Image: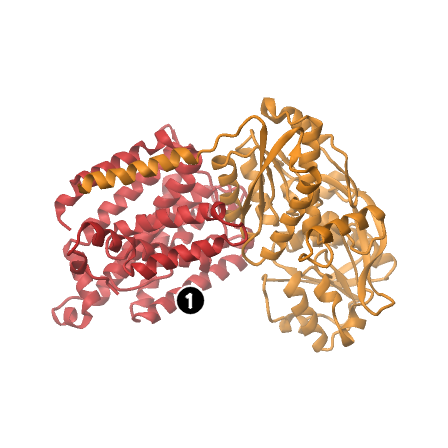
Chain colours: A orange, B red
């Protein structure tokens, strides 16, 4: 009796295994998406999925004449979690295309995984580490968004020439994405002759900046802040309380709504802070404004304006679907036609044209912005300049750019 | 448990099913579910020895496993080009020895404490080690950690192949399971349970209580080291997020939902944990799946404080559940 009951359970397990292997039918295309739906970036991951949903709505859940099956998966910004998520999508759910991930280190891990799965096409979500595509790229990994260095295009030149800063310090979280942004910013700034007095790297989620605030020298012109979210707010308030008055230069995710919502003395302090990135919410271009209105209509409970996470995932998903349309859903021959279509794609996005370089890395427009006070007293990021078609080596010499070395705490050397 | 249980029909059927599993399953089921279950099980098995049989709840098992994994990257090869590139057998032995020393030292430190204070001190070690690896670039390569620690080819079997990797993990899991089931019935194991139940009396009887406890930590560390090495081979990589507070507590969850009363609890807990962790997102809205994970674990602990194996005993072996009451 005991035995038969146990074997029944065994049979049930085996049956469950077999039935869970879903067979993809010829008339549908399976796309797996990965975003950080848990952990510290959960809100941003949700925003990324909004971008996916906007693209799906635009295409009516069909591309290349076939129905789309979307399987969503979650990571928590750690490479391990991204690998677990992508393995499930590819090996269990049997997706044809993966769109994701969101965070830098995850992207590096998924690029390595992509090399072991030549039959699947990987399209980056918004992860912005440099070496995902710059060095040792995977032939089946495509990125239509910029990396952290590209996002900083034009900022170094602007603060050197227009703002007249010569000597600065930098502060950022101690991992690959802020390193990448610092490289992009300092590359221009140092080439023109700017100097870095010190570079501070803090753990993510650092609360106490007093030692750093105390060691910022007096003879500098400005501080480049690559911190994001709560880290940026904590640093700014502690710096301000300590009486600091050096102007700021913002990273891509530094000057967001939490900083723009500043009141009182800090408000006049942050006015004039320049930054750069792939979007600028106040841009008056009609295509961008229409897209912004679509976002608000589709997600009344979303952010006041779409963030770069929704924007990035929208572009990535749009690229995946546009190429599917071009090849009429033909994924035969190991996705050969599909990948050719992706490689040659010139995508019209809400923020201008995007095309790919030989490493399948996006060449995109970058927005240089500055915090400005509107007539009604609120702060916003005013578009100063659009730097058109920035490539991964910041439109400079490729060999020279590669010679700067892999991103890190002290790259570029800036001498 | 009688010695004959090891060759009972149920054990044989389970062994055959596990051995035949690669015939049915795809790569995902073999590695992400199968191998992962065995690895979690091996690490949690150490905790069951410590907590279930020794009365010492350690949250540092994952740190010990992590040190073994890091040792594989540091002394072997990795894609950051920072490895020392020693021969594989030397690397494996070094990894196990280092991790065992680390785990034993944690034991030396924490056997001075009891109950909640043991949990606190091992949690402190785990958290400290996590932040150390995240901020130390000279040895541990900081936030990024190491990638490209590939499973080797041994005797013509490429362990990167899901089937062979599954069997590798199965062999180590079976070996660890048999070793621990044997160990807890040995003189040492019985003495350890005596120490758990009444340390002062064992001391009076002439047993060296601390030595027994530290030995248990050392054995648990060997298991953690094996699990750690298999983990880096499975993931190809290791970074601080693999050994943070979350994973440390996952091991405790696995041991508790499986049941601390018998070594098999480690593997049952690991299987449930792995399945829920992978498939909860398919069951419910993608923004709420962590709630399902929590609810399943809460449900198990609420209705069976001695884990799933306690349930099993009450269902199939009425009357025997009180014989091996929960150890806490």
Label 1, on which residue? B124
Would residue A227 be seen by someone viewing this image from the given angle? yes
Question: Which one is nearer the viewer's eye here, A232 or B265?
Answer: B265
A240 lies left or right of B282 = right
What is the number of callouts on the image?
1
- Residue A221 relative to residue B289: left or right: right
**Which type of secondary structure does the marked residue at label 1 adopt?**
helix
Q: Where residue A182 sits in the image (x, y, percent)?
A: 70, 54
* Residue B222 visible in rendering: no
Q: Position of residue A399 (x, y in %)?
A: 73, 39
The image quadrant where one finds the C terminus of chain B is bottom left
Q: Quadrant of residue A59?
A: top right
- Label 1 crowding class (10 Å Cα cut-off): few <14, some 14-19, many 20+? some
Could you tell me residue A126's position as x and y percent?
A: 65, 47
Q: Chain of mark 1?
A: B
**Residue at image location 13% in from the left, 72% down from the top:** B204
Where is residue A101 drawn, in percent x and y?
60, 45
């Amino acid at each position: 009796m005991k035995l038969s009951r146990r074997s029944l359970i065994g049979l049930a397990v085996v049956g469950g295994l077999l039935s869970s292997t879903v067979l993809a039918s010829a008339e549908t295309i399976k796309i797996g998406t990965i975003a950080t739906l848990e952990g510290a970036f959960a809100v941003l991951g949700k925003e990324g999925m909004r971008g996916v949903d906007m693209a799906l709505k635009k295409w009516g859940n069909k591309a290349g004449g076939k129905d789309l099956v979307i399987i969503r998966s979650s990571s928590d910004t750690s490479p391990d979690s991204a690998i677990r998520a992508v393995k499930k999508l590819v090996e269990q759910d049997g997706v044809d295309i993966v769109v994701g991930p969101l965070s830098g280190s995850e992207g590096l891990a998924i690029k390595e995984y992509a090399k072991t799965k030549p039959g699947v096409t990987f399209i980056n979500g918004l992860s912005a580490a440099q070496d995902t595509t710059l060095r040792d790229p995977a032939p089946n990994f495509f990125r239509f968004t910029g990396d952290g260095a590209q996002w900083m295009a034009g900022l170094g030149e602007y603060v050197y020439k227009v703002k007249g800063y010569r000597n600065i310090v930098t502060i950022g979280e101690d991992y690959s994405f802020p390193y990448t942004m610092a490289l992009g910013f300092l590359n221009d700034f140092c080439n023109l002759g700017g100097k870095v007095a010190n570079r501070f790297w803090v753990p993510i989620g650092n609360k106490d900046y007093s030692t750093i605030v105390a060691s910022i020298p007096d003879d500098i012109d400005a501080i480049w802040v690559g911190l994001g979210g709560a880290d940026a707010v904590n640093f700014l308030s502690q710096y301000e309380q300590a009486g600091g008055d050096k102007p700021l230069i913002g990273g891509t995710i530094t000057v967001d709504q939490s900083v723009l919502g500043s009141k009182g003395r800090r408000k006049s302090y942050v006015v004039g802070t320049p930054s750069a990135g792939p979007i600028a919410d106040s841009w008056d271009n009609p295509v961008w404004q229409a897209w912004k209105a679509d976002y608000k209509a589709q997600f009344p409970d979303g952010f006041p304006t779409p963030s770069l996470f929704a924007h990035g995932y929208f572009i990535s998903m749009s690229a995946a679907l546009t190429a599917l349309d071009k090849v009429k859903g033909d994924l035969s021959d190991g996705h050969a036609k599909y990948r050719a279509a992706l490689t040659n794609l010139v995508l019209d996005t809400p923020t201008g044209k995007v095309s790919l370089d030989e490493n399948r890395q996006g060449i995109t427009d970058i927005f240089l912005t500055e915090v400005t006070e509107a007539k009604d007293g609120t702060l916003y990021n005013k578009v100063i300049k659009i730097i058109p078609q920035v490539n991964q080596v910041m439109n400079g010499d490729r060999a020279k750019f590669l010679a700067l070395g892999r991103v890190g705490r002290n790259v570029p050397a800036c001498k | 448990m009688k010695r004959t249980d090891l060759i009972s029909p149920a054990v044989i059927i389970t062994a055959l099913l596990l051995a035949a599993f690669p015939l049915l399953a795809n790569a995902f089921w073999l590695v992400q579910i199968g191998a992962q279950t065995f690895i979690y099980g091996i690490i949690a098995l150490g905790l069951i020895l410590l907590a279930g049989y020794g009365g010492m709840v350690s949250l540092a098992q994952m740190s010990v496993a992590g040190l073994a994994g890091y040792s594989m990257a540091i002394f072997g090869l990795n894609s950051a080009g920072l490895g020392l590139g020693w021969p594989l057998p030397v690397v494996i032995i070094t990894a196990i020895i280092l991790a065992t020393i680390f785990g034993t030292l944690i034991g030396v430190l924490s056997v001075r404490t009891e109950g909640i204070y043991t949990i606190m001190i091992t949690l402190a070690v785990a958290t400290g080690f996590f932040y150390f690896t995240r901020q130390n670039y000279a040895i541990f390569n900081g936030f990024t950690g190491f990638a490209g620690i590939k499973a080797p080819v041994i005797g013509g079997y490429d362990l990167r192949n899901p089937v062979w990797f599954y069997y590798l993990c199965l062999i180590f899991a079976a070996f660890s399971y048999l070793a621990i089931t044997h160990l807890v019935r040995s003189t040492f194991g019985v003495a350890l349970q005596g120490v758990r139940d009444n340390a002062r009396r064992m001391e009076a009887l002439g047993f060296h209580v601390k030595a027994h406890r530290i030995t248990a930590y050392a054995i648990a560390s060997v298991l953690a080291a094996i699990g750690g090495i298999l983990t880096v081979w499975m993931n190809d990589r290791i970074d601080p997020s693999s050994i943070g507070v979350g994973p440390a507590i996952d091991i405790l969850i696995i041991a508790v939902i499986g049941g601390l009363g018998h070594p098999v609890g480690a593997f049952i807990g690991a299987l449930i944990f792995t399945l829920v962790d992978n498939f909860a997102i398919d069951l419910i809205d993608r923004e709420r799946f962590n709630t399902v994970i929590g609810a399943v674990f809460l449900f198990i602990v609420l209705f069976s404080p001695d884990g799933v194996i306690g349930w099993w005993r009450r269902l199939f072996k009425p009357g025997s559940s009180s014989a091996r009451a929960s150890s806490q």
